[in-house]
């Protein structure tokens, strides 16, 4: 086998892996959009579609990891190609976690079936979800285009997602303190907001891996973080 054929085979294999990652990204975007729609309309059936669809995302993640590991073992890529393979594996992991968070939003939506609503909160969550969904869409474009400037802009945008989350958290807390009947649904809504915020964090992770694939350097973690609420509730069912 000549060197030209080896290079062509490597390029095809790498392109196939990247295509799987982009497919994962599309599924994650759809899962988040459907989870937000299910929450807004209290659609338990659509929420179940999101829950079941996460299995496909998990399978694609495994496929990407397996193919990438095989590529590393058989082709021994160097320099820029090695960085790209490693970045793709990390991006796949970030997308898999995003799928988990979308699934958990769907689970919370089902758990709230029949429960009362807190005025205005669902529309606020919908706007936050749309903001983060756009982050995922744009960061995948940045990866495809190898656009470092666009990836850096996504990293900066995560600060706004943090700010939206903290504003929502304060709103939920106020509603729960004013009326104890809001506590159960308020807790569910808080965890949903936290899941959406975490998806924004993973979009930032994808942006960082995009920058690494192109430049060979990871951005320094010196971004200013929005002053988070001291009381941090943690997800227990992921």
Image (cartoon, rainbow, N blue to C red):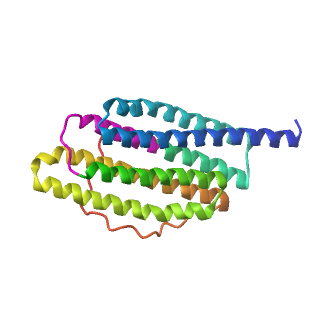
Q: Is residue 72 magenta?
A: no
Q: How far across and down, in percent of the image, does residue 52 sit?
A: 42, 29
Q: Give the side of residue 197 with respect to residue 75, left or right.
A: left
Q: How far across and down, in percent of the image, does residue 179 sit?
A: 10, 52
Q: Which quadrant, please, contains the N terminus?
A: top right
Q: Is residue 238 visible?
A: no
Q: Which quadrant, please, contains the C terminus?
A: top left
Residue that extends furthest to the right in the rendered view of this protein: 2
Q: Is residue 132 visible?
A: yes
Q: Is residue 123 above or below residue 223?
A: above
Res 43 quadrant in image: top left
Q: How far across and down, in percent of the image, does residue 153 sit?
A: 53, 64
Res 139 quadrant in image: bottom right
Q: Is residue 103 magenta?
A: yes
Q: Give the side of residue 89 with respect to residue 121, left or right.
A: right
Which of these two is toward me, 193 or 73? 193
In percent of the image, x 41 and y 39: which residue is there?
34
Which of these two is toward me, 146 or 91? 146
In percent of the image, x 31 and y 31: which residue is there?
44
Q: Give the side of residue 179 with respect to residue 106, left or right.
A: left
In percent of the image, x 49 and y 57: which residue is there?
204
In percent of the image, x 10 and y 49: which residue is there?
180
Q: Is residue 220 above or below residue 92?
A: below
Most frequent secondary structure within the magenta stretch? helix
The span shown in magenta is 97-119
Q: How far across and down, in percent of the image, does residue 133 sit?
A: 46, 50
């Amino acid at each position: 086998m000549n060197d030209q054929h080896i290079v062509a085979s490597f390029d095809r294999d790498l392109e196939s892996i990247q295509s799987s990652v982009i497919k994962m990204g599309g599924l994650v975007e759809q899962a988040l959009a459907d989870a937000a729609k299910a929450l807004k309309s209290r659609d338990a059936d659509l929420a179940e579609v999101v829950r079941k669809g996460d299995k496909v995302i998990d399978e694609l993640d495994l496929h990407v990891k397996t193919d990438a590991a095989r590529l590393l073992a058989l082709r021994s890529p160097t320099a820029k190609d090695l960085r790209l393979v490693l970045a793709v594996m990390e991006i796949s992991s970030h997308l898999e976690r995003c799928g988990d968070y979308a699934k958990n939003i769907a689970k919370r939506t089902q758990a709230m079936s029949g429960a009362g609503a807190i005025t205005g909160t669902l529309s606020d969550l919908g706007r936050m979800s749309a903001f983060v969904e756009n982050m995922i869409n744009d960061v995948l474009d940045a990866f495809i285009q190898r656009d470092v400037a666009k990836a850096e802009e996504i990293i900066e945008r995560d600060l706004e997602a943090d700010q939206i989350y903290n504003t929502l958290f304060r709103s939920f807390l106020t509603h729960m303190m004013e009326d104890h009947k809001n506590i159960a649904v308020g807790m569910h809504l808080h965890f949903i907001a936290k899941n959406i915020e975490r998806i924004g964090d993973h979009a930032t992770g994808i942006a960082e891996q995009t920058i690494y694939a192109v430049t060979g350097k990871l951005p320094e973690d010196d971004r200013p973080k929005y002053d988070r609420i001291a009381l941090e509730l943690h997800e227990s069912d992921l």
